[in-house]
Amino acid sequence: MEDNVRAKRIGYMVIAAAWLAVFCLFGYRATFSVLLGPMQESMNWTVSQTSLGYSLMMTIYAITAFFSGMIIDRYGTKPAYFLGAIFGALGFYITSYVHSYVAYLAAYSIFAGIGTGMLWVSSTVSVRKWYVGKAYATMWGLAFMGAPMAQVLLSLGAKQILVTMDWRIAMRVLALVVFVALIIATLIAKKNPEDYGFKPFGLEAAKDGQPKEEGHTWELGEAFKTYPIWGVILAFLTSMVAEFLIWTQVVMFWVNDIKLSLNTSTNLYVAIGIAGIFTMPLLGIVADKVVGLVNHEAKGRKIMLIFAPIVGVVACIVLMMSKYSLAFGVLACILFAIYWAIEPGGAAGYAGAIFGGKSLGKIWGFATLIVMGIGPAFGSFMGGYLFDVSGSYYNSVIFALCAFAASVIFAISLPLDLKAPKKVTKTDEAIAG
């Protein structure tokens, strides 16, 4: 009984640390859109020049994510969160002092890229290592709730600072927030359950489907010779292309095509975050209920990975109907929040269900390198490019709709099981000889 109580307490600390990590990670994304205008105006840069810093940051983020996965498989999340605290804070703080374009690109992309790259894989995989089966999505939903909280609190907080002060002060305040939050995450973070003599929560409930009792330790090259990892990468990647196109272009869609004011459009964008505060935990519970109903975790995660981009398709259709009523815009925000609550955690959950937890850090780290190295940049680029050639963001939204539809197709193709390759023993070699 005491061991169970201690295991639960440690598990809750893992969730709290992951919440803080996700809060800081998505705080970077949420605040950049607020700081973009003041930065480019005061430094006399173009919007595309200023946005390049974010694009380069995402590239370094993707590369760093791979290495963070290798760190947590061996040492747990403490080192990753600590490095995230140092580099994440420096990303804001050093950037606040730059006066040249080259210095801005170097400071923001390198420091922020390394800092944020230490947060995503570490938070998702740490939760997955502690919670599997019917326990995973509910707990990940609680941890992922840090993302919409950051979108609401940090974006509005930065906006309020900009009313009376400049973007440099806002960045210094954000540097302090990131540093304090991630130092707390470092202090309360825990290693993997086996380091304490525990097994993941929900393991018994997953006995009829993956993951089972941990057995095979997958090598990276071994895992990437199988279809399940490439299938979930393609499903996740196409959704990320659509998602980042929407996140970066939706405000200008409302302003340019629907003729709403910038203030109204910004408030609508914040509504996605507000809705996400509720959809994250609720959809986590729903996802775990689905796993329980089908009595097979990989199948349950696959169902949710099909459902999420379908919601994305519907959200794009409803978004384009904003021209008829503002209510459609609000409904689109809620639908995007529902999609957002399922897809990222669901993709990691499916990978964990197939490959187990022992090797998940490096496997999901490399998968994240591929997805985040391509998806955000390509989605954002296509959103702007299609507007440039057509003069309307409707074509951008249609492109996002098609990307969500492609994600549905890839999700449908995902297999439900994968047999680990048999290791050749000395006895096998003797018999073969």
Image (tube, rainbow, N blue to C red):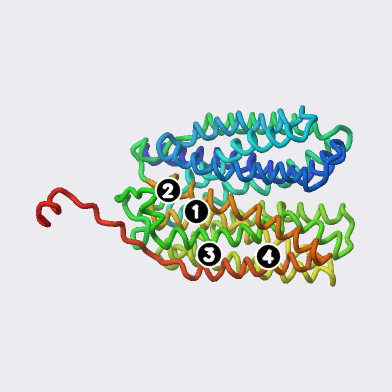
Q: How many marks?
A: 4
Q: What residue type is disc 3 on?
A: Met
Q: Residue at x 55, y 59 (%)?
A: 236
**Residue labelled with disc 1:** 348
- Image quadrant assignment for residue 375: bottom right
Q: Is residue 299 left or right of residue 19?
A: left
**Residue labelled with disc 4:** 400
Q: Is residue 37 left or right of residue 346?
A: right
Q: Are marks 3 and 1 in contact (CB under 8 Å)?
A: no
Q: Secondary structure at mark 3?
A: helix
Q: Secondary structure at mark 2?
A: helix
Mark linked to residue 360: 2
* x then y, percent, for residue 72: 45, 38
Q: Earlier in the sequence, mark 1 or mark 2?
A: 1
**Residue labelled with disc 3:** 304
Whole-number angstrom distance, CA of label 3 to CA of label 4 = 19 Å
* Picture quarter with the N terminus: top left
Q: Are marks 1 and 2 in contact (CB under 8 Å)?
A: yes
Whole-number angstrom distance, CA of label 1 to CA of label 2 = 9 Å
* x then y, percent, for residue 279: 63, 57
Q: Are marks 4 and 2 in contact (CB under 8 Å)?
A: no
Q: Earlier in the sequence, mark 3 or mark 4?
A: 3
Of residue 188 and residue 302, the one placed in the foreground of this image is 302
Q: What residue type is disc 1 on?
A: Ala
| On screen, residue 163 above or below 391 | above
* Picture quarter with the C terminus: bottom left
